[in-house]
């Protein structure tokens, strides 16, 4: 995905991320689950115990935390080109999600007193049950979590019409975490209800309203399952193009 953005000439700056520690992951997850997955004893979100998956996990959550720090530092926006977070709950994962990088990052930033309140706008097609589970288990009242499932294309107009108010509902947050799911596309086999143009409008609304109310945004890719893969790349490319249009041009 990053290679595609560079090839398309989008003005991005690539920053090397730092991995998170087991202790940081355990802010969101049971330590026995963290150790079990990373030691390849317990199954990961792919229902396997692959070492290469385990080795990648501190880097995926680390990418998100690193990007969140960048957004807070520059006061505008940063992207973590990662997926696989929101179905990971306190002590389990599924649906390609092992550790919840959204919550790992949020809790790490809170522990460091970098933030007081955070908004999570999850526009993946599927409900962020893992995120909600961690919030509920830890009794968190400083995160505004918005995640909904939509049945069909008839919901598109309502979704886009109400989206500005949803973003404005994060006024007072120090950071907006935005999951820009490509599986909201109407042709996605596991989605969806928005056309390509409507997805681009979704992204424009989120970025422009966040900029208007002065909330830095950290965003990531989330789901996208169309074949050929070029169709998913196009959707993510459009998200980055909307980001550039709002924050750079």
Image (cartoon, rainbow, N blue to C red):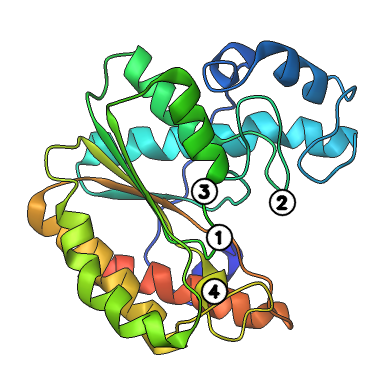
* Label 4 secondary element: helix
Quadrant where the C terminus sits is bottom left
Pointer 1 with pointer 2, Cβ within 8 A = yes
In primary-sequence order, the first of circles 4 and 3 is: 4
Residue 7 tag number: 4
* Label 1 secondary element: loop
Query: Is 3 situated above or below 121?
Result: below
In primary-sequence order, the first of circles 1 and 2 is: 2
- Packing grade of label 2 (10 A; few <14, some 14-19, many >=20) is some
Left or right, 158 with respect to 40, comes to: left
Quadrant where the N terminus sits is bottom right
Quarter holding residue 3:
bottom right
- Alpha-carbon distance for marks 4 and 1? 30 Å
Give the mark toward the camera: 4 or 1.
1
- Residue that mark 1 sits on: 126
- Packing grade of label 1 (10 A; few <14, some 14-19, many >=20) is many
- Alpha-carbon distance for marks 4 and 2? 30 Å
- Packing grade of label 4 (10 A; few <14, some 14-19, many >=20) is few
The image shows a total of numbered marks equal to 4
- Residue that mark 3 sits on: 128
- Residue that mark 2 sits on: 95
């Amino acid at each position: 995905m990053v290679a595609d953005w560079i090839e398309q000439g989008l003005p991005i700056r690539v920053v090397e991320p730092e991995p998170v520690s087991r202790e940081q992951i355990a802010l969101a997850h049971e330590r026995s689950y963290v150790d079990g997955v990373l030691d390849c004893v317990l199954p990961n979100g792919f229902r396997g115990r692959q070492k290469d998956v385990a080795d990648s996990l501190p880097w995926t959550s680390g990418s998100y935390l690193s990007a969140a720090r960048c957004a807070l530092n520059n006061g505008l926006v940063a992207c973590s080109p990662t997926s696989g977070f929101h179905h990971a709950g306190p002590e389990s994962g599924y649906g390609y999600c092992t550790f919840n990088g959204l919550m790992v990052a949020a809790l790490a930033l809170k522990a460091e007193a970098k933030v007081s309140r955070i908004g999570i706008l999850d526009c993946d097609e599927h409900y962020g049950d893992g995120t909600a589970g961690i919030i509920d288990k830890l009794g968190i009242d400083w995160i505004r979590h918005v995640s909904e499932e939509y049945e069909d294309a008839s919901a598109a107009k309502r979704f886009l019409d109400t989206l500005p108010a949803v973003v404005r509902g994060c006024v007072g947050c120090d950071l907006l975490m935005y999951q820009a799911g490509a599986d909201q596309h109407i042709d996605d086999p596991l989605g969806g209800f928005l056309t390509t143009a409507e997805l681009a409008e979704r992204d424009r609304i989120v970025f422009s309203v966040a900029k208007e109310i002065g909330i830095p945004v950290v965003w990531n890719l989330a789901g996208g399952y169309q074949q050929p893969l070029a169709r998913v790349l196009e959707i993510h490319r459009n998200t980055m193009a909307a980001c550039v249009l709002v924050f750079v041009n």
